[in-house]
Amino acid sequence: MHDKKIAHIIIPGLEAYSQFYALEYSDKLAGLLNRSEKVAIDDDYYGLLSTLFESGSSLPVAGLKQKCEPGGNEYLLCADPVYMQADRSQLLMFDSHDLEISMSEAKQIIESLNTHFIEDGLEFSIINECQWTVCTSDFTRVDTTALYRVINRPLLDAMPTGEHGSQWKAYINEIQMLLYHHDVNLVRQDKGMKTVNGIWFWGGGACPEEKLNQHTHLRQVFTDEQWLLHLAKLDTIAALPNDAFGQYSVKNNNSDSGDILYIDTRLSSEYKRLSSQQFTQWILSAEKNLWSHVKPMLANNVDQINIYPGNGFCYEVTSSTVLSTLLAKIKAYMQPIIGR
């Protein structure tokens, strides 16, 4: 266990939303960031989670979303429905949240995929209309790119790699041809809707036979993401929904051991974009239910707060950074007086 008790606050998409709507951070958050030490990190949401949970490898996101039980032999990948569009010399991809796929459409496509790939040993399943998975016992040595990292971006450089990468690239191409004249897409075309013309594979892995890590520093997780709650359960880490954070921050003191992890994914690109009004409401809610509880934690039950707004930086806030900022302000205020 490291010496410091750290509260990690991860909000993927916060920076992107602020830029998209040209809105400033809330007062309390801006105050925290101004009192922090800014550290560059790899802007990889799932990689960050893997590091914090100390899994030692990429998290098996698909298996966690399916809530598979430990010890299973299944290898699962996320197989999310997408729309791929040629744009000049490159291929762009849009995720299912732009497509408004119905459950009936999802079931029809999944049935076609399972029939077509039965001899390949692929079995597709539905988590919800926008999130699908595929189970396989072969071609498991593959490296993939998370869906959020390729949305609205050129994807040819993000195709599967590794020993079996070529096989999964072939599956992607084969699925495109299968879906081109699919009944679901013919109906969607008649309605002027984007088609479901592709599948993106990512987040693969087998379910662990035991706890992902017996020595993780995390002792409390706050999230509304069901697969992350399942991950915490596998690691026997206490987990609560986001709205319990305020009460926890007030009641707990520094005698508790272990780090805290708070994750709010409502701004993630994996979810349908919020309107300007909805984002403003999120800002007001976060100001009241999150940021107002964060700074007092430094004096009460944590040594350091790490804030990750999804911009490639971690903002480390400690009592010393807050004090140094205060002293700098006092010095700037006193300088004209001293100079007289």
Image (cartoon, rainbow, N blue to C red):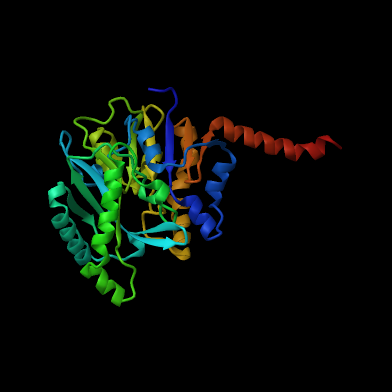
- Horizontal side of 40 relative to 67 (left or right) equals right
Task: State whether residue 79 appears in this view.
Answer: no
Outermost residue toward the bottom? 190
Outermost residue toward the right? 340
Residue 12 location (% of width, % of height): 43, 48
Q: Residue at x 44, y 53 (%)?
A: 154
Which quadrant of the view contains residue 61? Answer: top left
Q: Is residue 272 above or below residue 76?
A: below
Q: Residue at x 46, y 58 (%)?
A: 89
Which image quarter holds the C terminus?
Answer: top right
Residue 328 location (% of width, % of height): 68, 35
Residue 91 location (% of width, % of height): 41, 57
Q: Is residue 252 above or below residue 128?
A: above
Task: State whether residue 72 appears in this view.
Answer: yes
Which image quarter holds the N terminus?
Answer: top left
Residue 250 location (% of width, % of height): 40, 40
Which residue occupies the foreground of this view, 139 or 79?
139
- Horizontal side of 272 relative to 237 (left or right) equals right
Q: Is residue 4 above or below residue 109?
A: above
Q: Is residue 27 above or below residue 277?
A: above
Q: What is the total number of numbered labels drawn onto the structure image? A: 0
Q: Residue at x 39, y 62 (%)?
A: 85
Which residue occupies the foreground of this view, 340 or 62?
62
